[in-house]
Image: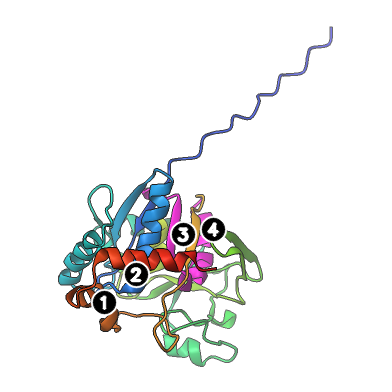
Amino acid sequence: MTPSPPLSTPAVERPAPPYRGRLAPSPTGLLHLGHARTFWIASTRARAARGSLLLRNDDLDQARCQPAFVAAMQEDLLWLGLTWDRAMVSQSDRIDRYRRALERLHAAGRIFPCTRSRRDVIEAAGAPHEGGADDEPLYPREFRPNAAAPLPPLGDRIEVNWRFRVPDDVEVAFEDARGGPQRATAGRDFGDFIVWRKDDTPSYQLATVVDEIEFGITEVVRGADLIKSTFRQLLLFKALGRLAPRYFHAPLVLDDKGERLAKRHDALALRTLRAQGRTAQSILKQFEQETRKP
């Protein structure tokens, strides 16, 4: 008698995890209208999905971060009517978590030490600047060590930059909840990027990815100026064997010269506007009107 073939187990469709977003201000200055609108969008999307929202203090830049700005950003968010679940998390308290992720990348051979200065990279032939002053220049492939060469140990204290080796000429893509399909080619549109700095601090790219993973963030709402960072972070999610969240890149608020707001725009800081008599309700109404525009 011919045995019957084994029954195939039907695929069980698992329910999507509950929505969890985050607010991630950096305490290097006062929050301005651009920050406020992005955080309001994040709050609105979390509320619409009946989800939760976490507050993360991105305070890795110890040279620029100030305790006064940490207190101010919380006060300004609450004044605007934005709330979050659970206690605020500070990245400076999580260095050990980021270090473990770095060690995983090191063990997998996905990173390499780099002694080149930023000026070296910018001045190198064929190394055009990738973006604004806060972005990384395109790292020349000839600066890389041989991929087959053994890596030196990380050491207890890191005193050299470590970069993630991107897979050259591989397309990285994602669907942005606002802007639609986004694509970039690794090694052309962005290059090998820093994941740990020579002052022994993790980079924004690595710390953010570790946080999104460990806190179960399902959607990241942030400014459109960070789209290129998303491509880099997608590679880190893959290298760490984890799925990436969804993304919504909000349009930037521009000043009267058409430039994106920065923390030097004190005239548009929430504290300045509040002192001038602006109410939180008027600011939120402004945001609602702007989002209705085509």
Mark 1 and mark 4 in contact? Answer it, CB < 8 Å. Answer: no
Q: Name the residue under label 1.
A: 269
Q: Amino acid under label 3?
A: Leu
Q: Amino acid under label 1?
A: Ala
Q: Nearer the viewer, residue 171 or 192?
A: 171
Q: Name the residue under label 3.
A: 105
Mark 2 and mark 3 in contact? Answer it, CB < 8 Å. Answer: no
In the image, which is nearer the foreground, mark 2 or mark 3?
Answer: 2
Q: Nearer the viewer, residue 218 or 185?
A: 218
Which residues lie in the magenta part? Answer: 212-241
Q: Amino acid under label 2?
A: His
What secondary structure is found at the residue carrying circle 1? loop
Q: Amino acid under label 4?
A: Ala
Query: Which residue appears farthest toward the top when viewing the image?
Result: 1
Residue 71 falls left or right of residue 224? left
Disc 1 from disc 4: Cα separation: 28 Å
Give residue 189's quadrant in the image. Answer: bottom right
Mark 3 and mark 1 in contact? Answer it, CB < 8 Å. Answer: no
Q: Which is nearer the N-term, disc 4 or disc 2?
A: 2
Q: Which is nearer the N-term, disc 3 or disc 1?
A: 3
Q: In which quarter of the image is the C terminus?
A: bottom right
Q: In the rendered view, tell whether residue 255 sits above or below residue 169.
A: below
Q: Mark 2 points at which residue?
A: 35
Q: Tag 3: Cα neighbours inside 10 Å, few (<14), some, or many (≥20)?
A: some
Q: Name the residue under label 4.
A: 177
